[in-house]
Image (spheres, rainbow, N blue to C red):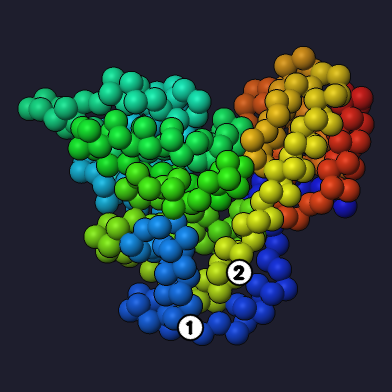
Amino acid sequence: MAIDLRSDTVTQPSDAMRDAAANAAVGDDVYGEDPTVNDLEAVAADRVGTDDALYVPTGTMGNQIAARVHTDRGQEVVLDREAHIYRWELAGLAQLSEVQPRTIDADGAVPSPDQIRDAHVAESLHRPGTGLVTLENTHNARGGVAVPAESISAAAAAAHDRDVPVHLDGARLFNACVALDTDPARMVRDVDSVVCCLSKGLGAPAGSVLAGDAEFVAAARRVRKLFGGGMRQAGLIAAPGLLALENVDQLAADHDNARRLAAGLDAIDGLRVPKPDTNIVQVNTDDLGGGAERFVDACEAAGVRGGAHGPSLTRFCTHLGVDRDDIEAAVDRVADAVRSL
């Protein structure tokens, strides 16, 4: 059987999650009458220290709702050029909110205060101005980097000094918090909104939560309806989400497995693999030749699934669906794959 390390989204819901879904109390969530969804939103808001939270089908929808709420048409959004919201969300900023990304090469996976100040554009007769700064933690495309709370706060302060709101794409927020031993409420204390995925390392079958103050969440609820995210008896998928929030401690094991995987792969001739912060392992195959797609195909033939994330960059993700034995087997299989090239 193949060891699937393409993403932590491939996790399977536990038997307890399946039982919770089957037995969930439900109602019409658009009317605010689904008790399980209401419980999940309350627990999630408490976990990240915000006034309120909104259950959404995906992290991408959560990010795009936040952009729509925070901005006016034509404004610029300052964000890292490798940000998920820019690279992997089908130009949603332009299509759904009619705003313009202003990308920068973020230092240490988060824009520095100076970069934010330099990128800021004042509203004028000729320019709509900067309407939003978005940050990401962990930063997916930069290798699952866990950004310290102090860096998030410094970037947010620079934006707020110019009356610009800040949204945090925290799809893997809990990974960052576990890696840095930081309380989630502290991590998001200085941003205006945050989205957290339940369906990645935490293991739920679907869903994310978008959190912020009461006014923001009320506006976000309307935009969720506009975007087609008004789910009816959504308690069936919210119930596993509640259990997913109990899996946060499991993330430390995923990080340990990622470090073991990285060390094993780095010892293979032709591969260069930096030590990961969290559960994302990036493999550079420049020295191997042939490109990432060829390497990924060889790995899959050997029984390990990964994903090409650049011409010579392959990503592997550890998750609760793989254990230490799987990691050791994956290293051996990738070594076989490299020998076959």
Circle nearer the viewer, 1 or 2 = 2
Is 173 positioned to the left or the right of 295 in the image? left
Q: Earlier in the sequence, mark 1 or mark 2?
A: 1
Residue 283, placed above or below residue 247 = above
| Residue name at image x 40 percent, y 57 percent | 49
Disc 2 target residue: 243
Residue 83 in view in this figure: yes
Query: Under tag 1, what secondary structure?
Result: loop
| Residue name at image x 35 percent, y 64 percent | 52
| Residue name at image x 70 percent, y 62 percent | 12
Residue 22, placed above or below residue 249 = below
71 or 318: nearer the viewer: 318
Circles 1 and 2, Cβ within 8 Å, touching? The answer is no
Where residue 161 sits: x, y (%)? 22, 33
Residue 300 in view in this figure: no
Residue 146 in which image quadrant: top right
254 or 120: nearer the viewer: 254
Where residue 206 sits: x, y (%)? 56, 62
Disc 1 target residue: 26
Residue 138 in which image quadrant: top right
Is 205 positioned to the left or the right of 268 in the image? left
What separation in Å lies between label 1 and label 2 (alpha carbons)?
Answer: 16 Å
Is 176 positioned to the left or the right of 284 in the image? left
Query: Under tag 2, what secondary structure?
Result: helix
Residue 156, placed above or below residue 62 = above
Residue type at mark 1: give it.
Answer: Val
Question: How many marks overall?
Answer: 2
Residue 256, placed above or below residue 248 = above
Is 2 positioned to the left or the right of 279 in the image? right
| Residue name at image x 24 percent, y 44 percent | 71
Where residue 266 sits: x, y (%)? 80, 25
